[in-house]
C-alpha cells in the first residue's frame, strides 16, 4: 500500500533553479483519488460544524435568556475569525508544511466542537454566551487552518486538474452545509444538546488519522531546502493583491459568496406569500445549494485552460448571478417588476435560485486556477498565499452578505436591495471582461474550446502538421516554438498538435 501513497517532489535540483519540494510529484490516479477522498471526508464534517447550530441553538439560547443580537454574533464570529486568521496561515504552511497545518486545524475544530457540547450545563447567561462565543472563535481558527491547507494540497496534487479537483471538493462543502442542520436536529431530538457536537467532533478524528497516513509529510522538503541555504520562497499576499488580475478575482470571491448569504436573512420575509412554513423555505434554499453542489465538478472540468478557461467560466458565473438577483425580486428595472411588491411567481423564484447555484459554482470553482495563471512562472511559490487569500475572501463574503442583505432590505425593500447587488455583479462582469482582454494567459480561442470539448481535431494532411504531431508526442515544446521563424508558437499549430497527440489528449 505504501507504493500508492503519493510522495514529495524529487530531491534533486534542476538547472533552472526549481526549488526543492515546491511541487509534488505526479502520482498514480488511485493515490490522488485516495487523498481527495480523505480531504472530502474531513471537509464534509468541518463544514457541517459551521451549520449544525441552525436547527436548535437559537431556541436553546433564547431559553437561557440570550437575545437575538448575541445569538447572531455567535453565528457570525465563525466566518469573521476565518477571515482574519487565513492570511497568517500562509506563513505556517511555508514553515511547518501543509499536512501538519491541515491536521492541526482539524484537531482544533474537533476540540472546539466537543467542548461546545458542555455549554448546556452553564446556567448564567453571560457565562453561557462567553463559552459559546470563545468556542466558535476556536472553531473558526481551526477551520482557517484546515481550509487553507486543503486548497494548497489540492493545488499541488495535480496542477493540471486544479479546478476539477476543487469542484469535486465543493460537493462535500455543499453537502456539509446542507446536512449540518438536518443531522443536528435529528441528533438533538435523539440525545439532547450535547449529542450533535460530540458526534461531529469525534467524527473528525478518523478523518485526521487518514490524512496523517495518506498525505506525505512535506516538512522534510523544507528542512532539506533550509540545510542547503535554499529556503522555500513564498510570495507575500500583499504582493499578489498588487496585481490587478488577482485583485479582481479576490473581489469575485467576495461578491460570488454574497448571494446565498444575502438570502439567508431576507428570503423568508420576501416569499412568505408562497412559502408559509419553515420546511417550504428550506426547500427553496435547497434549490441553490443542490445546484451548486452537483454542478461544481462540471464547472471545474469546463474551466480547464484547454477548454473554456477559468476566466471565461468565472465571467459567465457572475453574469448568471447578476441575472438571478434581477429576477428574484423581481427588479423594478425590469418591465414585469415595475409594480414593486406584486404577486410572486414561484416558477420565476425557483429559476432565480437555480441561477444563483449555477452562477456560484461557475464563479467559485475556477478561482484558484485563474489566480495561478495570473502568477505565471511563480505559481508554485504563490500557492500557499493564494490558498490563504481564497479562504479569507470566501469568509468575508459569507460574513458581509447577511449584513448587506439585512441593511439594504430593511431600508430599500427586498426588490431594490437585490437590484443593487445585481448591478454590482453587472459592473464586475465587465471589469473581468476588460482584464481578460489584457491578459494572454486568460484568453482561450474558440478553436480551443470546441476541439477540447470533443477531444477531436482535423487530421493534418501536410508535412508540417505531421512534424508537429511527432514533436508533440515526445513533449518537445521548444521544438514546436522553433517551427515559427520568430521563435513563437503558433496557437493553432500547438493546439492542433496537442489535441491530436496521445499524450496531450484531454490533458
Image (spheres, helix red, strand yellow):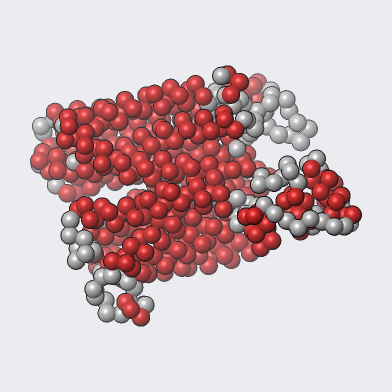
Quadrant of the image for the C terminus? top right
Task: Identify the residue at image location x=76%, y=54%.
Answer: 496
Q: Say left or right for 243 vs 468.
A: left
Q: Nearer the viewer, residue 503 or 270?
A: 503
Quadrant of the image for the N terminus? top right
Q: Nearer the viewer, residue 178 or 431?
A: 178
Image coords of residue 137 (percent x, y) = 31, 36
Task: Identify the residue at image location x=51%, y=24%.
Answer: 214
**247, above or below 425, in the image:** above
Q: Say left or right for 461 vs 384.
A: right
Task: Identify the residue at image location x=14%, y=43%.
Answer: 59
Q: Residue furthest top?
A: 2
Find residue 20 and report its image quarter: top right
Task: Identify the residue at image location x=59%, y=62%.
Answer: 435
Image coords of residue 452 (percent x, y) = 65, 54
Image coords of residue 354 (percent x, y) = 38, 59
Question: From where the camera sits, is residue 301 visible?
Answer: yes
Q: Nearer the viewer, residue 304 or 118?
A: 304
Image coords of residue 414 (percent x, y) = 27, 67
Amino acid at each position: 500500500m505504501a507504493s500508492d501513497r503519493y510522495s514529495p517532489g524529487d530531491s534533486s535540483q534542476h538547472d533552472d533553479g526549481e526549488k526543492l519540494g515546491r511541487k509534488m510529484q505526479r502520482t498514480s490516479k488511485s493515490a490522488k483519488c485516495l487523498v481527495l477522498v480523505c480531504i472530502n471526508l474531513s471537509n464534509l464534517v468541518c463544514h457541517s460544524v459551521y451549520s449544525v447550530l441552525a436547527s436548535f441553538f437559537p431556541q436553546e439560547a433564547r431559553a437561557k435568556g440570550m437575545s437575538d443580537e448575541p445569538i447572531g454574533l455567535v453565528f457570525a464570529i465563525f466566518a469573521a475569525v476565518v477571515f482574519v486568521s487565513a492570511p497568517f496561515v500562509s506563513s505556517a504552511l511555508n514553515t511547518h508544511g501543509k499536512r501538519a497545518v491541515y491536521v492541526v486545524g482539524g484537531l482544533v475544530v474537533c476540540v472546539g466542537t466537543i467542548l461546545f457540547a458542555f455549554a448546556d450545563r452553564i446556567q448564567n447567561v453571560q457565562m453561557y454566551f462567553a463559552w459559546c462565543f470563545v468556542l466558535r472563535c476556536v472553531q473558526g481558527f481551526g477551520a482557517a487552518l484546515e481550509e487553507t491547507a486543503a486548497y494548497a494540497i489540492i493545488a499541488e496534487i495535480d496542477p493540471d486538474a486544479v479546478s476539477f479537483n476543487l469542484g469535486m471538493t465543493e460537493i462535500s462543502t455543499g453537502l456539509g452545509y446542507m446536512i449540518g442542520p438536518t443531522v443536528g436536529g435529528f441528533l438533538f431530538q435523539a440525545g439532547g444538546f450535547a449529542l450533535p457536537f460530540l458526534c461531529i467532533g469525534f467524527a473528525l478524528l478518523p478523518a485526521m488519522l487518514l490524512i496523517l497516513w495518506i498525505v506525505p509529510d512535506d516538512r522534510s522538503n523544507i528542512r532539506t531546502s533550509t540545510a542547503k541555504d535554499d529556503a522555500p520562497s513564498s510570495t507575500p499576499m500583499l504582493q499578489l493583491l498588487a496585481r490587478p488580475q488577482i485583485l479582481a478575482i479576490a473581489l469575485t470571491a467576495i461578491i460570488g459568496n454574497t448571494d446565498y448569504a444575502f438570502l439567508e436573512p431576507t428570503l423568508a420575509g420576501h416569499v412568505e406569500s408562497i412559502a408559509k412554513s419553515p420546511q417550504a423555505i428550506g426547500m427553496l434554499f435547497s434549490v441553490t445549494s443542490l445546484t451548486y453542489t452537483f454542478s461544481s465538478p462540471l464547472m471545474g472540468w469546463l474551466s480547464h485552460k484547454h477548454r473554456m478557461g477559468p476566466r471565461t467560466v468565472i465571467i459567465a458565473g457572475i453574469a448568471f448571478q447578476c441575472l438571478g438577483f434581477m429576477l428574484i425580486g423581481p427588479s423594478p428595472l425590469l418591465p414585469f417588476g415595475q409594480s414593486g411588491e406584486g404577486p410572486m411567481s414561484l416558477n420565476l423564484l425557483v429559476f432565480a435560485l437555480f441561477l444563483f447555484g449555477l452562477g456560484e459554482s461557475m464563479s467559485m470553482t475556477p478561482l484558484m486556477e485563474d489566480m495561478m495563471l495570473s502568477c505565471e512562472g511563480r505559481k508554485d511559490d504563490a500557492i500557499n498565499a493564494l490558498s490563504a487569500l481564497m479562504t479569507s475572501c470566501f469568509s468575508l463574503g459569507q460574513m458581509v452578505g447577511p449584513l448587506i442583505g439585512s441593511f439594504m432590505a430593511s431600508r430599500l425593500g427586498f426588490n431594490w436591495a437585490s437590484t443593487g447587488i445585481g448591478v454590482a455583479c453587472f459592473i464586475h462582469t465587465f471589469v473581468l471582461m476588460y482584464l481578460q482582454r489584457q491578459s494572454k494567459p486568460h484568453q482561450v480561442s474558440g478553436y480551443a474550446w470546441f476541439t477540447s470539448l470533443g477531444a477531436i481535431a482535423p487530421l493534418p494532411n501536410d508535412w508540417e502538421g505531421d512534424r508537429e504531431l511527432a514533436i508533440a508526442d515526445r513533449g518537445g515544446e521548444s521544438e514546436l516554438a522553433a517551427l515559427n521563424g520568430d521563435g513563437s508558437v503558433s496557437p493553432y499549430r500547438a493546439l492542433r498538435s496537442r489535441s491530436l497527440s496521445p499524450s496531450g489528449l484531454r490533458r
